[in-house]
Structure formats: structure tokens, C-alpha cells
């Protein structure tokens, strides 16, 4: 990100602490160019580096990226296998920049169900950046909002049955502590959700956490989403009146 790009944001503008992005449109981007879908995913991976670096420079505290959903396993096996290999390439080339930018890597999802090589790579990235103190780059990988809520309910039921928790004491805070995003603590709920490609739905992403999130649906395919687009969406967020149910 250049200094000129930084100057596009007025110091008075409120930058979201937590931005979540549904990175949609990789396949359609590739089709438009007459290329296979995996080419779109590769280009999308390159754009993650650009947008993550920019978000860090802009003062974002957490950037959550919907990288692979629990429903994505139903895609063609060739595409799934490619997506499982992307973290190897991504962290293999981007890790020096992550360290330089002081970015922490978090992974939110059912990592135990990932292929062993993929799991090893993503958990190593978490370990290698654990001492960084800058922006959290949070990958939602093998993540699904409904599965997350069901998992939390099951764990609470087990604790209640064992007597380790009083069911009458279960409230929003206790439930949130049992969600996969609990490691994000008070930054677990996104302030802003951006979905690229023009689709206007949340596709089973952070169903609990998005309760009061501002949403922007951007027409750009993810590989075409630029730093200028990110800044434009942050400016739109700043214009919103967030009342959280009050008047």
C-alpha cells in the first residue's frame, strides 16, 4: 500500500476494528477470462496478500476471510484438492511479509477435518506468528455458521450434563465463549462485512457474530477487488448510523 493510498482516508473516519470478507467470484472471474476455476482461486490468493497488507496499514485490528466453507467439500474434487493446497503456496510465499508487517495468523474452523498436510501448514502459520502483535489475519477455513452453533450447543449440553455448568447461567456471553471465534475475544463480532461478486447473502458465515454487523455487497469479483474498493467500503461504513437496536 502506498502513502498516497493511505491519504485517501481522512483521520476522522472511523475504521472498523473487525472487517470480515466473503471472497466471492473467483470462479466467475476465471470463466470471464476463459480460464479454469482454479486460476481464479490462485489469483484470489494473490489478492489476499494485497488486501491484508492494506487493511493492516489502515488500522484494522482483525481481518476475517471466508476461505473455505463446510459446504465447499461438495465441489468437484479437483477444485477441492487445489483449494487444500493453496495454504501451502500462500504461507510459503507470504510468511516473510506477515512477519515484516507484524501480522498474526488465526484460523477459525474445524481444522481437525482438514487433510493432514493442509492442517499442518495452517497451524504452523499460527504458531510462527503467535508473537506478532499487529493485525489478526483470521482465516475461516472449513467453517460453517450452523455447524459452529450446533457444536457450541453440544459442548454446553455436555457440560450441563456433567454438572460443570449451571444451565440457568448460560447467556449470550457464555454461548459466545463456546463458539469457534472465542479466540478473538472482544473482537469476535465483525463491524463490517463485505461480500464481493454482487451476491447479496451471507452463505452460512458467522451467523451469530453478524447480528449487528454493517454489510456491503460489492459488485467486484474478489480477484478484482482493490485497495481503493476497500477504502470506499470503509468510507461507506463510516457514514452508517449504528444503533444496535436503540434509537
Image (tube, grey):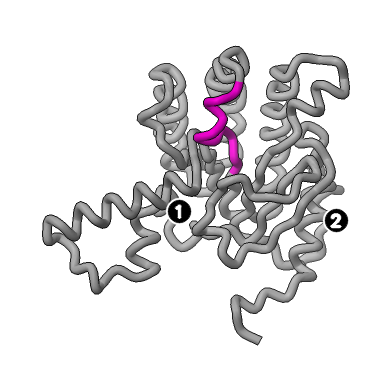
Q: Is residue 108 rendered to the left or right of residue 24?
A: left
Q: Where in the figure is residue 133, as x and y percent of width and height?
A: 49, 48
Q: Where does the N terminus fall, quadrant-wise?
A: top right
Left or right: residue 188 compared with residue 57 = left
Q: Which residues are magenta?
A: 65-75
Res. 149 visible in picture = yes
Q: Position of residue 147 (x, y in %)?
A: 43, 44
Q: Which residue is mark 1?
A: 184
Instruction: Determine the residue located farthest toward the left in the rendered image.
Output: 163
Please determine whether, in this image, residue 235 is positioned above or below residue 49: below
Q: Which residue is drawn at the image coordinates 52% and 58% (left, top)?
A: 209
Give left or right: position of 111 versus 199. left
Mark found first going from the N terminus, 1 or 2? 2
Secondary structure type for disc 2: loop
- Label 2, residues with CA under 10 Å away: few <14, some 14-19, many ≥20: few
71 within the magenta span: yes
71 or 243: which is nearer to us? 71
| Mark 1 burial class by Cα count in 10 Å: few <14, some 14-19, many 20+ | some
Residue, x 60% and y 79% (percent of image)?
245
Total labels: the figure holds: 2
In which image quadrant can residue 53 be found? top right
| Whether residue 142 is situated above or below residue 235 in the rendered picture | above
* Residue of label 2: 8
- Quarter of the image that includes the C terminus: bottom right
Amino acid at each position: 500500500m502506498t502513502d498516497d493510498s493511505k491519504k485517501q482516508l481522512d483521520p476522522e473516519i472511523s475504521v472498523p476494528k473487525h472487517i470480515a470478507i466473503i471472497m466471492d467470484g473467483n470462479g466467475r472471474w476465471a470463466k470471464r477470462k476463459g480460464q479454469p476455476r482454479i486460476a481464479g482461486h490462485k489469483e484470489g490468493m494473490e489478492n489476499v496478500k494485497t488486501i491484508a497488507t492494506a487493511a493492516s496499514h489502515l488500522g484494522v485490528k482483525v481481518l476475517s476471510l471466508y476461505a473455505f466453507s463446510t459446504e465447499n467439500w461438495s465441489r468437484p474434487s479437483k477444485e477441492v484438492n487445489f483449494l487444500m493446497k493453496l495454504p501451502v503456496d500462500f504461507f510459503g510465499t507470504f510468511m516473510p511479509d506477515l512477519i515484516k508487517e507484524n501480522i498474526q495468523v488465526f484460523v477459525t474452523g474445524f481444522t481437525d477435518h482438514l487433510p493432514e498436510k493442509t492442517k499442518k501448514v495452517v497451524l504452523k502459520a499460527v504458531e510462527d506468528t503467535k508473537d506478532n502483535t499487529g493485525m489478526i489475519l483470521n482465516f475461516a477455513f472449513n467453517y460453517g455458521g450452523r455447524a459452529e452453533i450446533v457444536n457450541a450447543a453440544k459442548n454446553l449440553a455436555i457440560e450441563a450434563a456433567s454438572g460443570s455448568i449451571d444451565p440457568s447461567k448460560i447467556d449470550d456471553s457464555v454461548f459466545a465463549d463456546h463458539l469457534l471465534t472465542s479466540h478473538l475475544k472482544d473482537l469476535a463480532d465483525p463491524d463490517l462485512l463485505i461480500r464481493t461478486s454482487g451476491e447479496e447473502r451471507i452463505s452460512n458465515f458467522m451467523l451469530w457474530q453478524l447480528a449487528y454487523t454493517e454489510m456491503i455487497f460489492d459488485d467486484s469479483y474478489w480477484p478484482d477487488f482493490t485497495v481503493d474498493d476497500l477504502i470506499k467500503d470503509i468510507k461507506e461504513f463510516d457514514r452508517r448510523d449504528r444503533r444496535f437496536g436503540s434509537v
